[in-house]
Image (cartoon, rainbow, N blue to C red):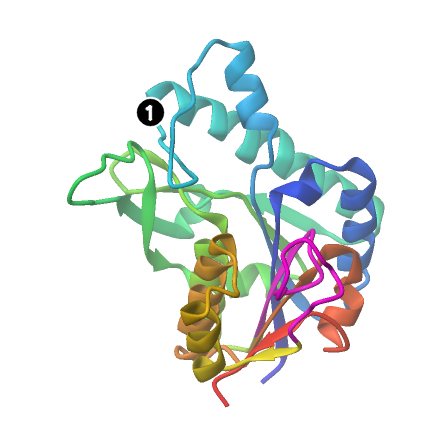
Amino acid sequence: MENLYVIKIGGNIIDDDEKLKSFLQSFASVKAYKILVHGGGKLATKLADKLGIRQQLIDGRRITDVETLKVVTMVYAGYINKNIVAQLQSNNCNAIGLTGADANIIQAHKRIHPSIDYGFVGDVDIINAELLKSFLDNNLSVVVAPITHNKEGQLLNTNADTIAQEIAKAMSSYYNVELIYSFEKSGVLLDANDDTTVIPSINHNYYSELKEEKKIFAGMIPKIDNAFAALNSGVKKVIIGKAEELTNLISHSSGTKITNE
């Protein structure tokens, strides 16, 4: 099997033009099959504020009402996705930008929660891995925006970390898949404010200890949960680390390795 890198880029990098430019140069230089999943950054919130659309967050998650869905679709699937694709083209990386609705690559359903209505937020049901493989086989790098659909005409705002995990799992039938979560920190940190406290490797037992001792900050827990779910479903490696160090993350010389060992 050949290697495939599924790389998720965090919103804080998208918000920084220079960091994004540098990251995309590194991404373009990766000589392997690759899929990039991006978040949305702060642009959607800023646009919603300008339009007078009140934003509601519960536990850090955006409630996506009808008007907010319009904004995130315009920003994520429109400007951010196509800006990334255009920059990759300038780096001689032929890329195609898609949402889950395009070519029916990601079907989802509206999130069901016992007490909270998240609005038009989607949870992934199906990844069309065969079609994604056909894009890769035609030497296209795929750039995925975090918008899915339910096959009934409804778009859904979907967590980008989860999309990356689900794509990585689905593609593991065809490739040796490495999932890389790249963001503004150097990896999983013992001290969230100190970039020198990177934990080189985390297995299940150590993860349980870190959570029990409250040595891992809450925002990192969903990423690590996603990482273990991916490893349990055929993904070979999961790395969490700094976007500007993408080359080192791929060579496993920086960041945090999540492992089942």
Q: Secondary structure at mark 1?
A: loop
Task: Indicate the position of residue 47 as horizontal and vertical percent values.
Answer: 56, 18
- When the figure is inspected, residue 12 is found, relative to residue 257, above or below; the finding is above
Q: Which residues are magenta?
A: 178-199
Q: Residue 159: percent from the left, percent from the top?
A: 44, 47
Residue 17 magenta-highlighted: no
Q: Position of residue 175 (x, y in %)?
A: 55, 78
Quarter of the image where one finds residue 195: bottom right
Front in this rendered view, residue 129 or 179: 179
Judged left or right of residue 240, residue 103 is: left
Residue position marked by numbered label 1 in the rendering? 65
Q: Which one is nearer the viewer's eye here, 145 or 1? A: 145
In this rendering, would 42 be left or right of 160?
Answer: right
In which quarter of the view is residue 157 placed? top left
Identify residue type, mark 1. Asp
Q: Nearer the viewer, residue 45 or 154?
A: 45
Q: Is residue 61 left or right of residue 42?
A: left
| Residue depicted at 49% across the width and 80% down the height | 206
Query: Does the magenta stretch mainly form a helix, a strand or a loop?
Result: loop
In the rendered view of the protein, which quadrant contains the N terminus?
Answer: bottom right
Residue at image coords 44%, 81%: 204
**Farthest residue, direction bottom:** 261
Quadrant hosting residue 6: bottom right
- Residue 147 visible in the current orientation: yes
For residue 170, say whether it is visible.
no
**What is the residue that sits farthest to the left in this orientation?**
114
